[in-house]
Image: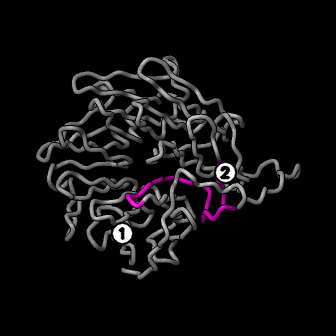
Amino acid sequence: MTTKLPRATGLGNLSIWILGAMLVPSEPASAQEPDRDPYFTPTAAKTTSSMPRVIIRNIREDRAGNIWFATFGGPIRYDGKEFTNFSEEVGLVHTRIFSLLEDRSGALWFGSITGGASRYDGKAFTKFTMKEGLGNDDVTWILEDRDANVWFATGNGASRYDGKTMTNFTTKEGLVDDAVYAIAQDASGRLWFGTQGGISSYDGKSFSNLADQVGRSFVNIRSIVVDRSGNLWFGGQEGAFRYDGKTVTAFTSKEGLLSDFVGSMIVDRAGNVWLGHPGQFPGGSGGGATRYDGKSFEQFTREDGLGSATVYCMLEDKAGNIWFGSVDAGACRYDGKAFTQFSATAPPPK
């Protein structure tokens, strides 16, 4: 299905996104509403020295060096000194943010759960929901490919936006499963999709199921990265898998992973592969992070200084620090020697 949309124009400088004058403070919570979910309630944008205790699902760095957090309380920007939280009042279509992207034009994209995606070009927001042609309003990942198309991983397939039209791809077009969680592009330009039911790739014309090529299935693939040698890594419910174009090598707790559930991955500038483990609820037991240098695994847990056992996302910033986002302890930064906690200021989620 292809839907024509107007092309957004008027790009601005992200480093001077000053929205305070646009905000309308929300009403304080009523004493009669003790059970309301704080993550669905818009909050006035406010700047603090600490990270609110919200669920963090993605971390990105913009070209100005600001760190952005996709949280269930709205996007939060860290400028190296203070955290600023943005809400629906500024124009976001929804505040339960799951994914982030800064595209090559400098525009910011925010993908939400149940609310579709929002694009900010420095002047105004453009919304992308099912009404505008998006495949589904649950947007779990956003990727810009080498041709400047923006791809959305959604709860009903993958959607591609070329600046004018939205095209949706589902199992009808060849995806192995309609619940898509992650998208990546390899050096050849082929796109890879991690889904609930396996891994698909797309060459621009047709889809292929990786299971058909390697003879094994994959479950609940939540993350995809390409390492410095060009190998693809897939993280999911049953561990991490490295694919060299011919064969698949599996890594689980037996090989040295902290946990078999790999929910996020990054490759740092030294070539190390970092794997984030959400842990098991309640309590996040068994979670944390694992670093693989190509020969051995090193595990990081609360005992080592990691702020949480529920690592949902990671980022290496321009200075070489590794950031971790969690479900219960805000953000944590590792400089290669020690961890720095950015203290949470609200009660942990239920």
Which residue is painted at 60% across and 33% down in the image?
329
Circle count: 2
- Tag 2: amino acid: Tyr
Looking at marks 2 and 1 on the same chain, the residue that comes earlier in the sequence is marked by 2
Q: Is residue 44 left or right of residue 77?
A: right
Q: Which residues are magenta?
A: 85-105
Under circle 1, the secondary element is strand
Which residue is painted at 44% across and 58% down in the image?
106
The residue indicated by pointer 1 is 160
Residue 282 in picture, x, y percent from top left: 58, 34
Q: Nearer the viewer, residue 345 or 173?
A: 345
Residue 320 in picture, x, y percent from top left: 39, 30
The residue indicated by pointer 2 is 39
Between marks 2 and 1, how big is the CA–CA gap?
28 Å
Residue 289 in picture, x, y percent from top left: 42, 29
Q: Establish if 44 lies above or below 304.
A: below
Location of the N terminus by quadrant is: bottom left
Q: Is residue 118 left or right of residue 34?
A: left
Q: Is residue 103 magenta?
A: yes
Location of the C terminus by quadrant is: top right
Which residue is painted at 26% across and 26% down in the image?
293
The quadrant holding residue 317 is top left
Q: Nearer the viewer, residue 55 or 221?
A: 55
Numbered disc in front, either 2 or 1: 1
Q: Nearer the viewer, residue 211 or 321?
A: 321
